[in-house]
Amino acid sequence: MSGPLLRVENLKKYFPIKRNILETLRKAPVRYVKAVDGISFEIARGEVLALIGESGCGKTTAGRTVLRLIEPTDGRIIFDGTDITKLSREEMRPFRRRMQIIFQDPYASLSPRMKIGDAIAHPLLVHGLAEKEEAREFALKMLKRVGLTPEDEFYDRYPHHLSGGQRQRVVIARAMILKPEFVVADEAVSMIDVSMRASILELLESFRKEYNLSQLFITHDIAVGKLIADRIAVMYLGKIVEIGPTDEVLKNPAHPYTMALIQAVPSIARRKKEKKLKITGEVPNAANPPRGCRFHPRCPFASETCIAHEPELVEISHNHFVACHHPLR
Ligand SMILES: Nc1ncnc2c1ncn2[C@@H]1O[C@H](COP(=O)(O)OP(=O)(O)OP(=O)(O)O)[C@@H](O)[C@H]1O
Ligand SMILES: [Mg+2]
């Protein structure tokens, strides 16, 4: 089928903030953390979109909401032409198989008491795709496929017998055994030794080729995004502030925040002599984001317009969008 595999329209996720006793007595209105506040993007078949931004900007919430592991507050999620936003648990079932997630911490996402081979076979049993013996055969093949050999030895090991990199291979194998079309990889290499990262990224890349796998690759590390992504989306306080083809965004960042993220990484900084943007302060509280452009309190170019009006995403070159009143050019 043509068209994007995934389309996300104006997606929002607000978390209510627990009121203290005084607020409850005063019947103060419930306030919300606007973790994701109206994001839109598409992912084509076989495409990798990296979602990049500082801690707390809403990346994980966005990824989990897209998969409906948490319920969206508003917006639409369209997967392979079907609006899945409001599907019931039962109606979601066939989609669950096609959409998988790989978490940051492979130790936390594996049961310590389950043999890793059984952990990999488990999704096949849950989805009724194989009987026990057959699932074991598939799991053995998958162990080999992800480089955990001899596979029959690895099958009987427990997570604590493995290194961090090996555990992440198990988590990837478990997600890939269902031959998904789409995966959210949430900081999939962040907790892994730098020496092992490249091989884990290569493993994901090999599944992209084999399954034509689309990925939403969440990372705070723009250098990792450069390695793996076709396009990059930069998030700031619940919003996408810039999105475009990886090379274009890295060579010609238009948002000052993107520029600052790039300049912070020497290996991808554009010109060493280029004047460094001075971004001060921390990401503001998502419960009370600044009005106008959310980045204005930290932006060296902020003007009255930025304080008064929230910028919309505007296309500044082919497929390259930025939400900024004073884009860098
Ligand atoms: N279940 C929840 N209940 C209330 N607030 C939440 C919940 N989950 C996330 N938040 C808040 O939403 C905002 C976005 O969090 P999120 O975990 O999505 O950010 P992130 O970009 O993934 O950060 P990190 O890089 O640290 O993983 C934060 O302010 C966070 O405190
Ligand atoms: Mg996160």
Image: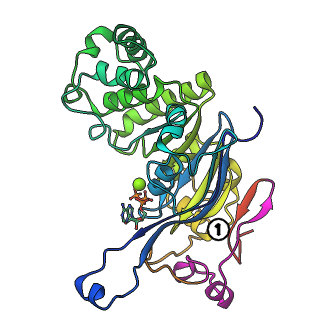
Dot 1: what SS? loop
* Residue 147 percent location from the top left of the image: 40, 18
State whether residue 123 is above or below residue 12.
Answer: above
Q: What residue type is labelled 1?
A: His
Query: Magenta includes 305?
Result: yes
Residue 150 in sight from this viewpoint: no
Residue that badge 1 annotates: 255
Q: Is 234 situated left or right of 193 in this image?
A: right
Which residue sits at x=53%, y=52%? 222
Residue 138 in sight from this viewpoint: yes
Q: Nearer the viewer, residue 248 or 139?
A: 139
Confirm if mark 1 falls within 8 A of ligand 1.
no
Residue 75 quadrant: bottom right
State whether residue 312 is above or below residue 108.
Answer: below
Which residue sits at x=30%, y=79%? 19
Q: How crowded is mark 1: few (under 14 residues within 10 Å), some or many (20 or more)?
A: many
- State which region is magenta: 292-318
Q: Can you say which quadrant of the picture contains the N terminus?
A: top right
* Residue 65 percent location from the top left of the image: 49, 53
Q: Which of 177 and 26 is in front in this view?
A: 26
Query: Magenta includes 295?
Result: yes
Q: In which quarter of the image is ligand 1?
A: bottom left
Residue 26 quadrant: bottom left
* Residue 102 percent location from the top left of the image: 42, 38
Residue 106 quadrant: top left
